[in-house]
Amino acid sequence: MNIIKRPRRLRVNETIRGLVRETRISVESLVYPLFVIEGENIKREITSLKGNYHFSVDKLEEEIKELMDLGIKSVILFGIPNEKDEVGCEAYHEHGIVQKAIKEIKSKFPDMYVITDVCMCEYTSHGHCGILTESGYVDNDKTLEYLGKIAVSHAEVGADMIAPSDMMDGRIGFIRDALDKAGYVNVPIMAYSAKYASAFYGPFREAADSAPSFGDRKSYQMDPANINEAIREVELDIEEGADIVMVKPALSYLDVIRKVKDSFNMPIAAYNVSGEYAMIRSCIDNGLLSENAIMESLISIKRAGADIIITYFAKDAARILRR
Ligand code: PBG
């Protein structure tokens, strides 16, 4: 007799589906991005990232309280300064926007884990992630000096973790050295290791006012076609001292996340970037997709091998997980 094999037995009801479920998201693995601006009493919705806001420092308390209540215990900070210049001075200034935000959060909520994005594009007048040569090329080794200063300035005011997103060569080793020399041996580095030159950063660049004023980022961020190169980048960052390695974006790069996961015994982060958020958000808002698309896409990132997910959906996910 030809017996029919019946995988559907394990799908009969939610209880059995729950028992055999292979991948779960927990709120502890989510990191929420926060955008901080100068000024007072400002909480303004970001048009390109509906449901996310620009906060002045004095308005952070309320937001962090909400995150804590939802069980979200870590944030990654992005600062938008009033003044930009050729070398991004505001990025490492003691009273720079991110430095003020870190102090505010850590003084009111010492348990909120504060990660900082270390990069120059929000702070430079030209919008590139480093210092330019006369011909407009981003000067790698000169940029390292600045990145080191920025990282130390974040640690000095209490950042828990440093996340360099600039894609310069040698930056992880350089920043590790700078942090250690300044006495911050216990501040870990989450490296944006395989960061692609992606069109999916569009809404973020609008939110952070960080689009390059000329050209693109292809001379430092990776070609979307490459995966072996991603492994080489990750390998270098691990050698240089990265504690966590990241793949970014997430959804168009699930194969890269999986390969990194299988190649290294390291915690892997994935950045579910602004364009990925905006696409799903607008489809949900327009009734084209159900809200289930949020967890389905986050689960796919987890299933691909990410331990940590940075996502603008963190608050939605936390609420859904509570139901
Ligand atoms: C800074 C930085 C970017 C993002 C995170 N850090 C923008 C970029 O590289 O142009 C993108 C995040 C997102 O799209 O959500 N270099």
Image (tube, rainbow, N blue to C red):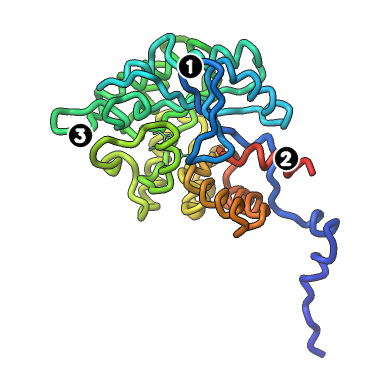
**Circle 1 residue:** 39
Residue 264 is left or right of residue 147, and the answer is: right
Q: Quadrant of residue 286?
A: bottom right
Q: Amino acid at mark 1?
A: Gly
- Mark 1 crowd level (few <14, some 14–19, many ≥20, 10 Å Cα): few
Question: Does the image show residue 301?
Answer: yes
**Circle 3 residue:** 137
- Mark 2 crowd level (few <14, some 14–19, many ≥20, 10 Å Cα): few
Closer to the N terminus: mark 2 or mark 1? 1
Q: Amino acid at mark 3?
A: Tyr
Element on which disc 1 rests: loop
Question: Does the image show residue 180?
Answer: no
Closer to the N terminus: mark 2 or mark 3? 3
Q: Amino acid at mark 2?
A: Arg
**Residue at horizontal 48 percent and vertical 41 percent from the top:** 48
| Ligand 1 visible in quadrant | top left
Q: Quadrant of residue 68?
A: top right
Q: CA distance from mark 1 to mark 3?
A: 33 Å
